[in-house]
């Protein structure tokens, strides 16, 4: 696989709820900016493996046929209505569990990113609940953008502030490059945060280390570096709430039974309470890039526009 890729294909799972529609609006925001195509996905519950027939049955009629047809019709109507400005968008209807359907479809359509809600309802007939989003994050080999139903009907106007918690690992570097891309694409302010959960470290030394790790910042990005201490999930979410952050971007490392973020806490603790969408970037993912600004960024990389601060507030 190539080390770099472009954001050409977006997968947007939906159960037709307001929450899922809110996530789709974020998918549309990315699609407009990057000229990407969106594929809608809906999963229908698999039929039972044992179905007793009526004693006087005279014909064999699939009791799930009508449900599948209704789901197909609803999906197509939903696609036509919500994607009027994206005539090339597609839709996929599958039978199976949401997690398995999302993971399989993301590979089948070669999606560069999955955009999904973290809460749903018992709809037609599977809901994309928080546990499903967490399961997808835990198993996906590509970035996952999760959107909580803070305001289901609100349409994102843009991305103005991005927070990227980091350590000094390879996966943190990949997340940081995603954050750089998005900050450049949306002309957003980028805050790079290093958190130490234990006492006894030197603020100035840690800031120097963080500055060296970040390196040169493209002219197209306004970046601020922060170092602080505290409980990671609490500090990240509190900072995002206090400063009106529009997007949190962080790297994740897949473990046997969970997914651990680069700041030493589980994705579940962050995504369940985050006041804004969260983009999780797995260790084995590629790095998306913006074709229009790639050469310009390479020519003008330097420290300009970079500010540093010790402490969150």
Image (tube, grey):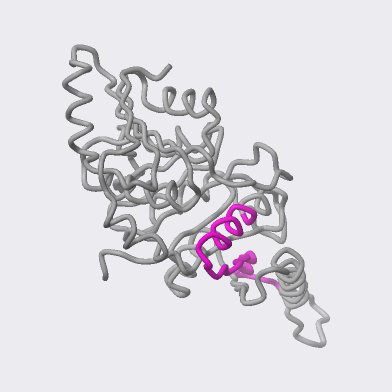
Q: The N terminus appears in which quarter of the rendering?
A: bottom left
Most foreground residue, 295 or 149: 295
Closest to the observer, 164 or 77: 164
Residue 70: percent from left, percent from top: 77, 72
Give the vertical position of 205 relative to 41 (above or below): above
Query: Is 279 situated left or right of 294 in this image?
Result: right
265 part of magenta stretch: no
Determine whether 253 is above or below 240 in the image: below
**Residue 33 lies within the magenta run:** yes
Q: Is residue 97 left or right of residue 154?
A: left
State the quadrant of the C terminus.
top left
Residue drawn at x 39%, y 44% as measured from the top left: 221
Residue 124 % position (x, y): 72, 61
The answer to whether 301 is drawn above or below residue 74 in the figure is above
State the residue at coordinates (62%, 73%): 89
| Residue at (27% x, 49% y) in the render | 301
Q: How many marks?
A: 0
Q: Quadrant of residue 92?
A: bottom right
* Residue 57 rendering spot, x and y as whole percentages: 81, 82
Snapshot quadrant of residue 58: bottom right
The residue lying furthest to the bottom in this view is: 59
* Bounds of the magenta segment: 24-53
Taking the view exactly as shown, the residue that stands out farthest to the top is 200
65 or 19: nearer the viewer: 19
Q: Is residue 237 left or right of residue 64?
A: left
**Residue at 45 percent of width and 38 percent of height:** 189
Pick the front one: 260 or 100: 260
Residue 50 x/y as whole percent? 62, 70
């Amino acid at each position: 696989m190539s080390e770099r890729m472009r954001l050409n294909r977006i997968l947007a799972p939906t159960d037709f709820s307001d929450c899922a529609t809110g996530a789709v609006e974020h998918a549309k925001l990315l699609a407009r900016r990057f000229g990407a195509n969106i594929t809608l996905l809906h999963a229908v519950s698999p039929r039972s493996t044992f179905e007793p027939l009526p004693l006087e049955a005279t014909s064999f009629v699939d009791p799930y046929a009508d449900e599948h047809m209704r789901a197909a019709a609803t999906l197509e109507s939903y696609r036509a209505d919500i994607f009027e400005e994206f005539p090339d968008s597609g839709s996929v209807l599958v039978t199976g569990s949401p997690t398995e359907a999302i993971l399989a479809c993301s590979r089948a359509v070669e999606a560069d990113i999955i955009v999904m809600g973290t809460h749903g309802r018992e709809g037609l007939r599977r809901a994309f609940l928080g546990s499903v989003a967490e399961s997808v994050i835990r198993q996906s080999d590509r970035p996952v953008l999760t959107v909580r139903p803070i305001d289901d009907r609100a349409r994102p106007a843009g991305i103005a502030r991005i927070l990227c918690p980091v350590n000094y690992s390879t996966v943190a570097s990949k997340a940081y490059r995603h954050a750089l891309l998005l900050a450049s694409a949306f002309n957003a302010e980028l805050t790079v945060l290093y958190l130490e959960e234990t006492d006894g470290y030197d603020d100035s030394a840690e800031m120097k280390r963080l500055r060296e790790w970040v390196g040169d910042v493209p002219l197209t990005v306004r970046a601020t570096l922060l170092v602080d201490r505290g409980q990671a999930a609490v500090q990240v979410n509190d900072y995002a709430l206090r400063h009106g952050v529009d997007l949190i971007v962080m790297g994740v490392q897949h473990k046997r039974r969970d997914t651990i973020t680069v700041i030493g806490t589980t994705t579940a603790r962050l995504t369940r309470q985050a006041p804004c969408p969260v983009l999780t970037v797995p260790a084995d993912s590629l790095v998306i890039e913006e074709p229009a600004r790639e050469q310009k960024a390479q020519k003008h990389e330097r420290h300009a526009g970079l500010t540093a601060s010790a402490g969150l507030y």
